[in-house]
Structures are given as structure tokens and as C-alpha cells.
Image (cartoon, helix red, strand yellow):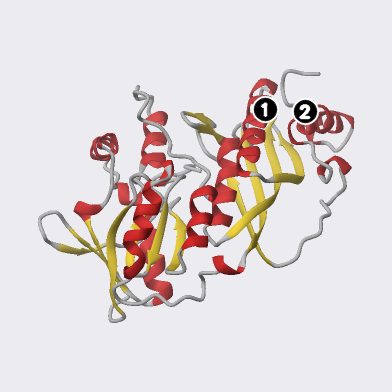
Amino acid sequence: MSDLILLAHGSGGESMRNLIEKDFLRYFSNPILDELLDSGIFEISGTLAFTTDSYVINPIFFKNGDIGKLAVFGTVNDLCVVGAQPLFLSLAFIFEEGFEMKDLKRILNSISQAAQEANVKIITGDTKVVEKNKGDKVFINTSGIGIIDKQRKWKDRKIEPEDVIIVTGSIGEHGLYIMLERLGVETDDEVQSDLANLSNLILPLLDKFDGIKFVRDATRGGVATVLNEINQKYKVEIEIYEEEIPVKEWVISASEVLGIDPLYAANEGKAVIVASKNQSQQIIEYLHQHPLGKNAKVIGKVKSFEKPKTFLITRIGTRRILESLKGDILPRIC
């Protein structure tokens, strides 16, 4: 077999079949996928969640992850934050002709390990190859299906004044690290993506606390954009406090050099939560018991229904409007 991805690997013929059977199934084999039908067939009942996403990150390999691990955890996180236990994923690759087979196997191994950690099965997929210089190494598209237990359904709970805003950890790490990586800046081991599987943090949290009214993973656009989505959807005024926002020192330093506010930088292992004030302390204590929630903090609150805006109270006491991200300061970040 060639050491490179060829156009024939996306042709639907023998080369593609060999790639699927000898490489993909080696990493992803399960009874549903092994049938190699045009659709994965399964039985399930209950309230379902369905999500889809595409991953075009540059670089494709980075500290604490790669495009494969990102594709799995990114999809799993989109399911768990709506209260769904992730079950099944689809996986579709678009390769550029000449992509190295060793890099493909590295990505497949990473996907396999991430899927095992998240306890999901890859049950269908696709492979396409575009000509040299018509793509950029590899893009991955996923879809995910999960099931929502009754106690995890938060979407009909009403957000009210005095509800608190929580972030599950320090912000801005994925986006700022990836930008430093692109610029070729040498960094120490602490400086890395925060990429993580949130299902083992978020789903038990939803099981335990009925005062959680909103959860969203703060990816592209960062925490600031999530907060603006909340104020627009629920028509509420939100106030957050700069001095309460958890940000690591290296993120602060990088943001000053790059001119990127951490509130707008992507995260791949952090969530924003709106919760009842009377459960906020218990929620924070619970989050602190988990490695992914040890830096969780209350960063603000819902003020009123008067102004559907988000305001930042700065360290010097001024109050300014915190808008959604304008444009794309960090293209191809996930």
C-alpha cells in the first residue's frame, strides 16, 4: 500500500475498500460499523439529541490533541451540554491527495482512544480525496446522536434575575495556544489546548442539580459570545465581573502580545452555565471535586429583563457593553 493518500483512496473502488477494511476498521470496529452498509442501523428510544460539526483546524497536531481527538470531543461536548448521553458518531474525512499515511494512522489512533474515553461508537462514515493543492491536508466532519434522560432536560427551565453565571474553568486556552503554535512561538508544557471530554463533568452535574438552566461549551467566539447568545435568546441583562474571571497567567501574557481578549478566544474544554442562585455554592463545590472543574467560578449574574445585553464590570469599576465577536479573529481554530 502507498505511504500517501491517493485520489484512488476516495474513488469508491478497491483502494478505498482496502483503506476502510485494513485501517479504519482496525481502529473503529464494532458490530454496527462492521456491516459496512450505507447507513448504520441501530435501535433506540427516548428523547434524542443530534448534532453535526466540521473540523478544519490548523495545525492538525498540537499539544494535548489533534484534529481527530478534537472531532470526537467537540461532538461529544455539543451533545452533553444539552443533557444528552453521547452514543453514536458518524465520521467523514476529506483528504488532500498526498496526505501521509502515517499521519492518517496517528489520527485514527487518536480518534479510537477518544471514542473509548467518551464511550461512543463510530457507526458510519465516508472518505473523499481532493487533488493536490485543492485542500489542506485533512478535514473531518462528524455527526453525533445522544439520548436525554428526563432529569437532564434543562431547556424549558426559566432564567430569572439573580441567577448566576458560572464558567467551569480558566478561559481562552485553546484559541490563544493555537495562535502561538501557528506563529512558531516556543512554549513550555503548561501552554497547551484545554481540549477535553466534558461528558463526565456535565452529565453528573445535571443529574444532581435541577437548578441548572443553561449550559453551552464556549468554543468559537469564546465566553463573551455565549453570554450574548444567552441575553438575546432569553431577553435578559447579564453582568459579569472581570476580577472573577479565571484566566491563567500565560493566557494573559499571550493575549497582551496577540491583542486578543481571552473572553473571545476559543475553549475546547470549558462550559458556561446559568444556574439558580440558591444552588450556586453547591454547584461550585461539586465542580471543584472534578479535575476539569477545579477552577470553576461564579463570574456574574442575570440582572433583569430590561436590557438584553451583557455588561463587563472592569477591575477599576467601569461598566462597558460586552458584545459578540465581530468577524473572525481566529480562523480555523477548530
Q: What residue type is labelled 1?
A: Leu
Q: Position of residue 164 (x, y in %)?
A: 32, 66
Q: How far apart are marks 2 and 1 (CA)?
A: 9 Å
| Residue 300 in sight here | yes
Disc nearest the viewer among 2 and 1 = 2
Q: Which mark is residue 104?
A: 1
Tell me if mark 1 has few (under 14), some (14-19) or many (20+) residues whose alpha carbon lies within 10 angstroms of its own. Answer: some
117 up-or-down from 163: above or below: above
Outermost bottom residue: 306
> On the rendered image, what quadrant is the N terminus found in?
top right
The residue sitting at 28% across, 81% down in the picture is 306
The residue sitting at 34% across, 75% down in the picture is 236
| Residue 325 in sight here | no
Q: Where is residue 131 in the image (x, y as percent from the top left)?
A: 70, 33
Q: Which of 319 and 289 is in front in this view?
A: 289
Task: Classify mark 1: helix, strand or loop.
Answer: helix
Q: What residue type is labelled 2?
A: Asp
211 up-or-down from 219: above or below: below
Q: Where is residue 245 in the image (x, y as percent from the top left)?
A: 26, 51
97 up-or-down from 37: above or below: above
Where is mark 2, residue-wise?
23
Mark 2 or mark 1: whose residue is earlier in sequence: 2
| Left or right of 263 in this view: 44 | right
